[in-house]
Amino acid sequence: MSRPSSRASFVSEATSSITGSRVRVAVRVRPPLDRAGAPEGIICGDDGHTLMLDLDGSAGADAGNAAASWAVRGPRVRSFNFDSVHDRPTTQAELFDGCGMCEMLDAALDGYTSTVFAYGQTGSGKTYTVSGPTATRATSSVSAMPGNADPLPASAGLMQRAAHYLYEAIGRRSGVQHTVRATYLEIYNEQVVDLIEPGAPLSVRGSVNGGFYVEDLSVVQCRGLRDLQYVIAKGLEHRSRGVHQMNLDSSRSHAIFSVYIDALDDDDGTGRPAAARYGKISLLDLAGSENVRSTQSHGTGLKEAGSINKSLFALGQVIKALALEARNGPESRQPSGLARVPAHVPYRDSTLTKLLADSLGGSAHTLMIACCSPFLAYADESIRTLHYACSAGAIRNKPVVKLDPQDQLILRLRDEVATFKAKLRR
């Protein structure tokens, strides 16, 4: 186990051929499970992109007739459109294959930064989506030891599936040497805690390139799939959990699992230096977004809820500012006149938004998974989640490949030579 070095001292950015990448949004509706028979208000369209929220519950569960009825149901019915919508029967494997997760992992292997975050109220299925069911997580934590890799159970979440996918993809990429490292942290009451080696809260510092990093966070060298599974299991074992009215097994922190992938091309025999790329993928399981009154929290639970709401409010303000910027350009119009001023994005307002600064409106590929409960009783929370998702989907990032500065210089010189030769031929 090692401590992180400041990669900002030797990593630079080269703009990719992609000029802009909109934040991708997938919506997952959890199955009824323990409340089967309770009134439901969400209907998913057959096209895999549309969703209807019926505030009266009069639409029932007749998804086949949903599309025809949306236009005539009036203001009590709201419809939404996303990159993908995953209805109640969706399995963990189907979600992984259909939400855009594979594209995020491939981008990280190519040297980009990718971020996937699950958002929604407590009990909407965020933690199940990201890390699987409680029983599976507990079993993994007890048996986690370096060695041979565990098989992938059907209930495995995005983290476990991502680990398998990464090493399978690395095995298919011949001519490239890969180095994999991983970190796992949580933000609890606005303080960063290392989930690999828990101890005193860690400090968030500003980096030389204008971003933020966590000082003295444990970094685990992963020589194979089993090592990465070990990091996941240890982190899940140490994560803060709590009980309140809406969920008997609730995550009371924001958790961030990150995998760093350094890729060095093998010598191709031409004498040209090998190119090095530095990719990263982060998976975030955010704490529940519900109103404090809904949880009936008190004491420590009330303090937790206050910190969670502060950070999620800050996240909402960041998303709102970036969505406005996407609509109106990088400057926003002042209400009182025609003058335009640079838009302010409040990344510094919370620990969470500091660590997400590069992922939202920055240089990363980003996927939001909005998790919703199907029940009519939680319609207000579902509307809030879906509006968040709509705003996030309007944000545009500018992904770049992370390169060593020397490699970046070589690539630029090659382009200049090629341009000069082309001019000479003309």
Image (cartoon, rainbow, N blue to C red):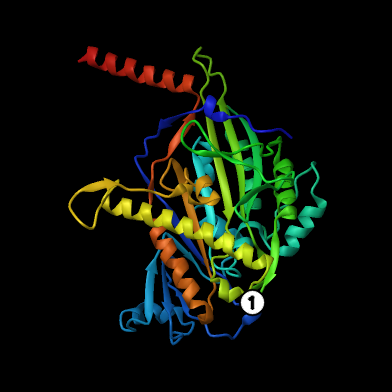
Q: Residues within 10 Å of mark 1 (few under 14, many from 20)?
A: few
Q: Position of residue 177 (x, y in %)?
A: 61, 28
Tell me if I can see residue 247 in this picture: yes
Tell me if I can see residue 394 in this picture: no
Q: Amino acid at mark 1?
A: Leu
Residue 216 in which image quadrant: top right
| Residue underneath mark 1 | 33
Quarter placement of the C terminus: top left
Quarter placement of the N terminus: top right
Residue 279 in which image quadrant: top right
Label 1 residue SS: helix
Q: Position of residue 153 (x, y in %)?
A: 71, 58
377 vs 231, left or right, is left
Residue at horizontal 43%, vertical 62%? 388
- Picture layout, residue 265 above or below residue 232: above
Residue at horizontal 53%, vertical 71%? 291
Q: How many marks?
A: 1
**Which of these two is toward me, 99 or 242?**
242
**Which of these two is toward me, 12 or 198?**
198
**Which of these two is toward me, 255 or 294?**
294
Residue at horizontal 47%, vertical 49%? 366
- Picture layout, residue 193 above or below residue 410: below
Q: Position of residue 99 (x, y in %)?
A: 50, 57
